[in-house]
C-alpha cells in the first residue's frame, strides 16, 4: 500500500442560457497571466437547448474550492468567465453542480497512481493477493497496466469474482 498514492480532480458543471463559446466544440483552455488559475480548462457538453460547460479543477485548487460554499464557487467562477467574455448576460450561470471527491469517505480522491520509484506491475501483483484468503482488493488502482481508468476497475472486479 505504501507504493500507491492518490489525487483529486473535481469537476464543476455549469449551464448557461446561451453558449458564450459560440459553435466551438471540445476543450476550452482559459489562459491567464496569473499562475493562480483555479479554472484552467473546460469541456463543452452542449446538446439541443442545454449549454453545459464542464470545468476541471485539480490539485490544491480542487481541495480549496471544495471547502467553499456552492454559492461562493459559482460567484467566483462567474467573475472569472466574465474576464474572457466581457458580457454579464453571456456568463450568467443558470445551473451549477460540483464534485467534491476528496471529501467522499469511500474514495478520498478521484484517482490513484503508483508513486515514483515503485513498479506498477509489482505493486499490483502484491495488492491483488487476497487478504487472509478471503478479502480481495479491487479497483482501478489494482490493475497492472491501466490504473486511473474506469475499465481497469471493472476488470479487477471480474478477476476477483472469478
Image: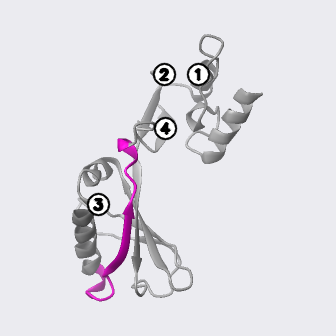
Residue 83 position by quadrant: bottom left
The residue at which mark 4 appears reads as 112
Is label 1 in a helix, a strand or a loop?
Answer: helix
- Which percent across, then down, holds residue 65? 27, 55
- Which percent across, then down, holds residue 68? 23, 55
Residue 101: image tag: none
Residue 122 position by quadrant: top right
The residue at which mark 2 appears reads as 1
The residue at which mark 1 appears reads as 127
Q: Are marks 4 and 3 in contact (CB under 8 Å)?
A: no
The residues bearing labels 2 and 4 have C-alpha atoms spaced at a distance of 11 Å
Q: Are marks 3 and 1 in contact (CB under 8 Å)?
A: no
The residues bearing labels 4 and 1 have C-alpha atoms spaced at a distance of 14 Å
Q: Is residue 26 above or below residue 101?
A: below
Which comes sooner in the sequence, label 2 or label 3?
2
Residue 133 position by quadrant: top right
Q: Is residue 161 magenta?
A: no
Q: Nearer the viewer, residue 24 or 62?
A: 62
Q: Are marks 2 and 1 in contact (CB under 8 Å)?
A: yes
**In the picture provided, is 69 more to the left or to the right than 14?**
left
Residue 116 in view = no
Q: Are marks 2 and 3 in contact (CB under 8 Å)?
A: no
The residue at which mark 3 appears reads as 38
Is label 4 in a helix, a strand or a loop?
Answer: strand
The residues bearing labels 2 and 1 have C-alpha atoms spaced at a distance of 7 Å
The residues bearing labels 4 and 3 have C-alpha atoms spaced at a distance of 21 Å
- Which percent across, then down, holds residue 109? 42, 41
- Which percent across, then down, holds residue 15? 41, 76
- Which residue is at a point 67% across and 34% down the rendered structure image? 157
Amino acid at each position: 500500500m505504501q507504493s500507491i498514492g492518490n489525487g483529486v480532480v473535481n469537476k464543476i458543471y455549469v449551464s448557461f442560457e446561451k453558449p458564450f463559446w459560440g459553435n466551438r466544440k471540445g476543450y476550452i483552455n482559459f489562459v491567464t497571466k496569473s499562475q493562480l488559475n483555479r479554472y484552467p480548462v473546460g469541456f463543452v457538453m452542449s446538446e439541443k437547448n442545454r449549454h453545459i460547460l464542464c470545468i476541471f479543477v485539480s490539485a490544491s485548487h480542487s481541495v480549496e474550492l471544495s471547502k467553499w460554499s456552492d454559492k461562493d464557487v459559482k460567484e467566483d467562477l462567474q467573475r472569472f468567465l466574465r474576464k474572457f467574455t466581457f458580457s454579464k448576460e453571456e456568463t450568467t450561470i443558470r445551473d451549477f453542480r460540483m464534485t467534491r471527491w476528496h471529501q467522499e469517505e469511500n474514495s478520498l480522491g478521484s484517482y490513484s497512481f503508483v508513486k515514483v520509484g515503485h513498479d506498477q506491475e509489482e505493486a499490483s501483483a502484491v495488492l491483488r493477493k487476497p487478504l487472509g484468503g478471503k478479502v480481495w482488493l479491487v479497483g482501478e488502482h489494482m490493475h497492472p497496466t491501466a490504473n486511473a481508468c474506469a475499465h481497469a476497475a471493472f476488470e479487477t472486479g471480474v478477476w476477483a469474482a472469478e
